Image (cartoon, rainbow, N blue to C red):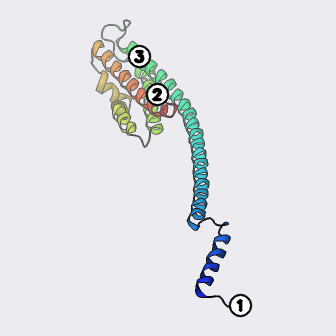
Amino acid sequence: MFNMDKAARSFAILAITLLACGCGRSVPEKILDEFEKVDQELADSMLASADLLDSKYEHLRLMACAEGRLLADSVNILYERASERLFALDELLAGPDVGEGNSAGSAFDPEGVAEQALRTSAALYYLMEQVTAGDSASGRIAEMGSPLSTVQDLDAWYQRDFHQAPPPVITATIERYVADMAKAKRLCTGVLLAPCGR
């Protein structure tokens, strides 16, 4: 068997190792190249994942915007109906055609203007609270709607706000209701349209 001395054997092992690692390139260079390759692949993967997340987020944002617009339209339509009924009630109770000593008259009859005004106003506030649930706006909307939502029935509403009240006071009360509804509506639609960037 061929014998090599210790120095020759060490040189041979080193030469074989260098050849195996890339024709004379140092081990650290080879490791660095591999590291850079893996690092680049990882960076590409992360960028692709980020692009995918951005795409999914934009899709969800557009869906939320579309849903928000539909709900905002519903809120606006119901607001128009409620405010129209409240102003019609004001016209019946305090308008120019109200005669001397005239009271609520038919306005507070079942299915009359007062009931319609109260029902649509309560429905509006309920809708606005539901579509903003989980947002701080919901509590503020509920607070603004409490003067109407806490009314037990038509007679209680009549006794509280309209009985023996002069026409200017009735008009001021109804205008305050409508103004509060408008403020709550703006707050609500602001939440609903937030995904649209408005």
Q: Residue furthest bottom?
A: 1
Residue type at the position of mark 2: Thr
Q: Between residue 35 and residue 6, name the one nearer to us.
A: 6
Q: CA distance from mark 1 to mark 2?
A: 106 Å
Q: Is residue 27 visible?
A: yes
Neighbour class for label 2 at 10 Å: few (<14), some, many (≥20)?
A: many
Residue type at the position of mark 1: Phe
Q: Which residue is mark 1?
A: 2
Mark 2 element type: helix
Q: Earlier in the sequence, mark 1 or mark 2?
A: 1
Q: Residue at x 43, y 27 (%)?
A: 185
Q: Residue at x 36, y 15 (%)?
A: 93
Residue type at the position of mark 3: Phe
Residue 168: x percent and y percent? 29, 13
Q: Which residue is mark 2?
A: 120
Mark 3 element type: helix
Residue 40: x percent and y percent? 59, 53
Q: Which residue is mark 3?
A: 87
Q: Viewer-nearest of labels 1 and 3?
A: 1
Q: Between residue 173 and residue 132, name the one nearer to us.
A: 132
Q: Is residue 152 visible?
A: no
Residue 186: x percent and y percent? 42, 26
Q: Residue furthest right?
A: 1
